[in-house]
Image (spheres, rainbow, N blue to C red):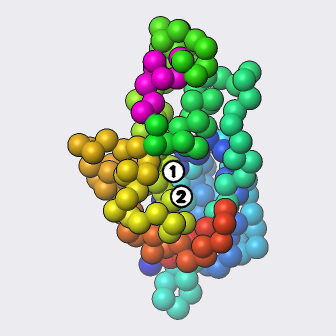
Amino acid sequence: MHVSLRRQLLAFPLSVAATHGRLVIRRRGYERMLLPGQEVTIEPFDAIDLHLDGSSVQPAACVLEIRDMVPAAPHASLHHRICKRVFLQPQYAWSAAFIAERLNLSTAQVRRTLFAQGTALTDLCRTQRLMRVLFEAMAGDVAVSALGRFAGWPVTSDLDSAFYDRFGLSMDAARRLATGRSSGRRLSVA
């Protein structure tokens, strides 16, 4: 069975450790194969695709662990500070006004700064909410049917489709892939 988790963009360092079979990480146009026992740390905001290539005879598995889940320092870019806050507290109604109030900035200043950093607030909120849904789906602590509410996903929007479009698999498939449910560590098997 082959499984790919596409377009992962986490606001925190992510440790990826191969435990069985073949694991390929695609990052910045390059591919790196990890052998069992090898581990790599992906830096925050470094987009990756993760490919597990296994079979019923020889399954592939890896452990994903988010490291240093702390809010961004005040001197970090606005984009990074917002991404980390949204990932940690996805249930809030993140808007330019809400962020401006918390960071002691004007709404216009928030919008101008994000524009200058080449990002849109809606896109970074959507991305970080989907990343949180991915890790919550694999953790198994929140029912799949309640993940949208947990992540502050709009009721009128289709979370299942957005999740599939982003990662290339359903939330139920992500839940089934995660077999090791210890705190902070997620074992994915293909």
Give the spatial CA distance, label 1 vs label 2: 5 Å
Graded by Cα atoms within 10 Å as few (under 14), some (14 to 19) or many (20 or more), the crowding at tag 1 reads many
Answer whether residue 133 is magenta in the image.
Answer: no
Which residue: 47% across, 8% down?
Answer: 108
Circles 1 and 2: CB distance less than 8 Å? yes
For the record, the magenta segment spans 93-100
Q: Main secondary structure of the magenta part?
A: helix
Residue 112 appears in the rendering: no
Q: Is residue 102 above or below residue 148?
A: above
Marking on residue 47: none
Give the side of residue 168 with respect to residue 128, left or right. left
The outermost residue toward the bottom is 57
Indicate whether residue 97 is drawn in magenta.
Answer: yes
Amino acid type, label 2: Phe
**Quarter placement of the N terminus:** bottom left
Q: Is residue 126 above or below residue 176?
A: above
Closest to the observer, 120 or 27: 120
Quick one: SS at disc 2? helix
The residue type indicated by label 1 comes to Arg
Where 20 falls versus 94 (above or below)?
below
The residue lying toward the viewer, choosing from 52 and 150, is 150
> Which residue is at the front of the view, 46 or 94?
94
Q: Quadrant of residue 74?
A: top right
User: What number is the disc on residue 132?
Assistant: 1
Task: Specify the quadrant of the image occupied by residue 58.
Answer: bottom right
Q: Which disc is residue 135 wearing?
A: 2
